[in-house]
Image (spheres, rainbow, N blue to C red):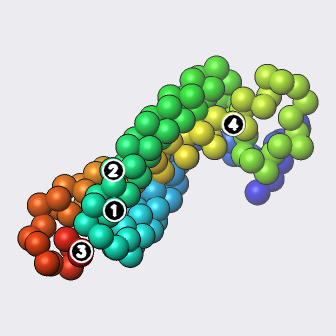
């Protein structure tokens, strides 16, 4: 990658690319959440774990996505990568680095949330004694 006259890596980030990378990280996070949920022993504890993970990911992911989109719009196309942090020269430039980070984390949370909530409903409806129901 090359740098422009300000020392920022070019080309600048695009919203679609940032959302796709966040969703891909969310898919990996969903697999981790499913594996973690299946290692939790006890039916009530498993359901509580899934409810907390799903709820927190939904709320935090939504807030981070909204904040990131706000900063993205406020920066008017001057979006920088985290590697471009040394090029930040003022307070207003920091939002150009925070925007893609917030959007990626928000997308990650909004991908994990429906998986956790869906698995919660599967565990809730599982037959007693099945591997999904747990003890």
* Left or right, residue 41 beside residue 100: left
- The residue at the point 42 percent across, 70 percent down is 36
As measured in the structure, the alpha-carbon distance from the residue carrying label 1 to the one carrying label 3 is: 10 Å
Whole-angstrom CA distance, mark 2 to mark 4, is: 29 Å
Q: Nearer the viewer, residue 30 or 75?
A: 30
**Image depth: mark 2 or mark 4 in front:** 2
- Helix or strand or loop: what does disc 3 sit on? loop
Q: Quadrant of the C terminus?
A: bottom left
Q: Which mark is residue 51?
A: 2
Residue holding disc 4: 98
Q: Looking at the image, is 41 positioned above or below residue 96?
A: below
> Marks 4 and 1, how far apart in space?
36 Å
Gap between marks 4 and 3 measured at Cα = 41 Å
Q: Earlier in the sequence, mark 2 or mark 4?
A: 2
Residue 117: where, in percent of width, then height? 28, 51
Q: Are marks 1 and 3 in contact (CB under 8 Å)?
A: no
Q: In this rendering, which labeled residue sits more in front, label 4 or label 3?
A: 3
Q: Tag 3 or tag 2, which sits nearer the N-term?
A: 2
Which one is in front in this view, the residue at disc 2 or the one at disc 3? Answer: 3
Mark 1 → mark 2, Cα distance in angstroms? 10 Å
Residue 15 appearing in the image: no
Q: Which residue is mark 1?
A: 45
Q: Quadrant of residue 120?
A: bottom left
Q: Residue at x 72, y 46 (%)?
A: 81
Label 4 Cα crowd, 10 Å radius (few <14 / some 14-19 / many 20+) = some
**84 or 122, which is in the foreground?**
122
Is label 1 in contact with label 2 (beta carbons under 8 Å)? Answer: no
Residue 75 against residue 129 in the figure, above or below? above
Q: Earlier in the sequence, mark 1 or mark 2?
A: 1
- Alpha carbon of mark 2 to alpha carbon of mark 3: how far? 16 Å
First in sequence, mark 4 or 3: give its number.
4
């Amino acid at each position: 990658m090359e740098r422009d006259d300000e020392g920022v890596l070019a080309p600048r980030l695009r919203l679609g690319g940032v959302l796709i990378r966040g969703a891909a990280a969310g898919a990996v996070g969903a697999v981790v959440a499913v594996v973690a949920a299946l290692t939790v022993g006890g039916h009530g504890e498993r359901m509580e774990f899934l409810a907390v993970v799903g709820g927190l990911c939904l709320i935090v992911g939504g807030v981070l996505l909204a904040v990131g989109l706000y900063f993205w719009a406020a920066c008017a196309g001057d979006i920088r990568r985290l590697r471009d942090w040394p090029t930040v020269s003022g307070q207003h430039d920091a939002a150009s680095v925070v925007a893609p980070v917030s959007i990626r984390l928000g997308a990650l949370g909004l991908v994990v949330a429906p998986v956790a909530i869906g698995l919660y409903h599967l565990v809730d409806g599982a037959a007693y004694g099945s591997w999904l129901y747990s003890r």
